[in-house]
Amino acid sequence: MSGTRILIGFVVAFCLAAAGTASAYHTAFVANNCNYAAPTPTSSITRDGSTTVALRARYEGYQWGGGCWNDNNFDDSPGDPTENPSTGGEGGDCSGFTFKVWRESLSTGDAGFYQWGMLRNVHGPYKAEHFKNGTGAPNVTLSKSAAIKMDALAKTTHIGMIYATNADGTDQIIEAKGEAYGTNIWTRAYRGDSSYSGVRRTGWSG
Amino acid sequence: MDRHYVTNPKVKNVAGLAAGAIAGVAVAVLAGTAVANRLASNAEEPLIEATHLPPLLTAPNEQIELRYDVYCLPDDAATDAPCDAAGTVFVRSGDTGPFREVSLLDDPAADEGRFLARVPEDIAASRIGFSYYAVLRSKGGGATVTLPAGGATAPQRSIPLGPSVDIRLGAHLFGAARKADIRVARAVWGTQAGEVGLEQGRNLTPIGGSAFDVDRNGTVYVLDEANRRLLRWPSGAGAPISMPLSINGTLADMSVDGEGTIHVLETTNDPGRAPLLRAFDRTGAAKAATEVVERASQIRIGPNGPVVLQHPSGQWMSAAIDGRPLPPSDQRRSGRAGRPLPGGSEIVILRRGNEIRAALVGASGVRRAWRVTSETPLAEIQLAEPLGNRLLLVTRVYTDDRGEFLVLVLDQSGVQRSFSLASAGWAETAPLSRFRLVGSSLFQLGSTPAGLFVDRFDLEVK
């Protein structure tokens, strides 16, 4: 009996502690860590540089409608409710991630380059389908067969950027995939999938 | 007082609960500490990444360059300057003897593969090809990465294609896809018995039935990752038998070996940890879980156990031999360019632009080789399997708004047979998990908004 009671106490305390911690993560990451600072205009953008920006978001989780992450290689708000874009968790969603990596403007008529800090909470004006259609001054559609590193493959519900190409013809894609997946690099077969289109951010200088 | 505590049931209950609570909090704190330690450990990992598309199969008189992209993450989070990298490629003729050092050149004008090594002409012209590996270094932080991961013990291999069967495909005719000979498995989306799970939501593209396999008896296995189970259709069965599996899912790949062991390759991993390869027995009981070395995209069954295609090495590595999981160091040492086949040979494939090169390679070199060019763009090679003395090749042809699979049976004279198949990919699967060849039957995993199915296409005239 004594052992049973100890076990019950253990489980209850552990669950309460874990739940309290999880609850804090779910609701407070953006509030506690993110900012709304103005972006820094830059004169150029390179594919290598943008890849570096993207790699910083790796392992930092996924948040539908989000766009704020740190660089501790850990999802600070795991297990967010997947159908709620307002849970204030860490990470971008697929289009917010692309917007930030491509250094775009909140103004869809502006094709200039804007450096957003990792902890700047910004999603940008584009959904995946906007990118797919080449909506916005910085974005154009292009033939998928011409897509290279840091171009993107987009469908109405998702977008991912090309990180590398594999010998078997698949691509390694860096993308914010979903709450259960986070943001990372995976091998994908998007290129030949008819639901995906090729998208390019204009103005790369290298 | 002590005695009173022991004999008073209420107090005894409270004391028990309190002791448990203290223990629970202690464990929670320890767990938190472990997470913190893991984070600290992650922060100390070398911040350097590299990519490379290996010239696995080369054509005569082809200029051979080894190109790499290198990314290093400076401490200054605001900096996105290209990585100031250096490195050396170690290259040699064939796969024995000393390596020759070639310094990397910086080609800043290149959109891809900014760091370049030119293979010395005498080595590039070697009739037995060459092997190589690269050690890449961030000048700033000093972090290094070796590619492929096995370095000198398992260098990448580049092989001359030699005399090949050259095939020129014209423009692909879309809309003439072959119908299945028989639908061997089907299930509607759902969570109940006989249904297959679907990951979906307003912010997630539909994902379901991420991988499948078929054994020699014709039993179809589908990894129902959303419901964390395996669905099994014995030959001729109308409804599946489900078996719970302890998996994370998330677009996992799967293969079933000849003894019925189910190998599931998880593709999503925690930071600082590699993806897991899990093995289950016929009843679904967990047998082993092994970390693979790198990002992994495919699992297949090799002559001695499961082999996994890993990146950025771009090599097939053994994950277990005769049921014994291999530690990472042994996995790295097992890296090879081709997928090992029963009998000791391997199949090497390379898709570049609108061309596919494929070779069956034995100990003495290339046994048979094919070179397929297409007017319509080619995407991934879904399947490349020996079919007797022939080769079955399944690739995807695409335009910007269409896509189909093209099935080619290649022999020594060219295309013995070809047909196209509808993409049938409403739900996303693991990237290279849509086809399997068993005997002379090709199986395709497909889906619609209603559910999932597996179709069979017989390749021989019966």
Image (tube, helix red, strand yellow):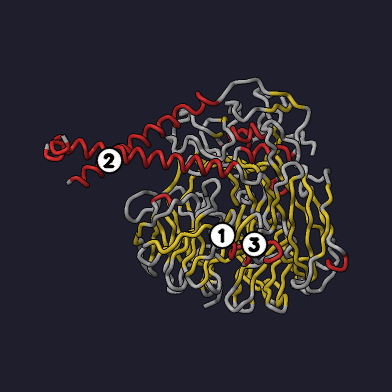
Instruction: Give the residue displayed 57% in from the left and 26% down from the top.
Output: A121
Q: Residues within 10 Å of mark 2 (few under 14, many from 20)?
A: many
Secondary element under disc 3, as helix, strand or loop, is: strand
Labels in figure, total: 3
Residue designated by label 1: B298
Chain ID for label 3?
B
Q: Which mark, by number, is residue B20? A: 2
Mark 2 vs mark 3, CA separation in Å: 50 Å
Looking at this rendering, what residue extends furthest in the right direction?
Answer: B121
Tell me the mark number nearer the camera, choosing from 2 and 3. 2
| Type of amino acid at the residue the image marks with label 3 | Gln
Asked whether the residues under marks 2 and 3 belong to the same chain, the reply is yes
Can you say whether B47 is above or below A114 in the image? Answer: below
SS at badge 2? helix
**The residue marked by circle 2 belongs to what chain?**
B
Q: Residue at x 73, y 60 (%)?
A: B133
A15 lies above or below B405: above
**Mark 1 / mark 2, whichever is N-terminal:** 2
Real-space CA distance between mark 1 and mark 3, rounded to the nearest whole angstrom: 11 Å
The first of marks 2 and 3 along the sequence is: 2
Q: Is label 1 in contact with label 2 (beta carbons under 8 Å)?
A: no
Which residue is the site of mark 3?
B315
Measured Cα–Cα span from mark 1 to mark 2? 45 Å
Q: Residue at x 73, y 38 (%)?
A: A49
- Rendered location of residue B219, percent (x, y): 42, 68
Dot 1 and dot 2 within a common chain: yes
Instruction: Please state the chain letter of the residue tagged with numbered disc 1 in the rendered image.
Output: B
Label 1 sits on what residue type? Gln
Badges 1 and 3, same chain: yes
Give the side of residue A44 with respect to residue A79, left or right. right
Quadrant in the picture for residue A58? top right
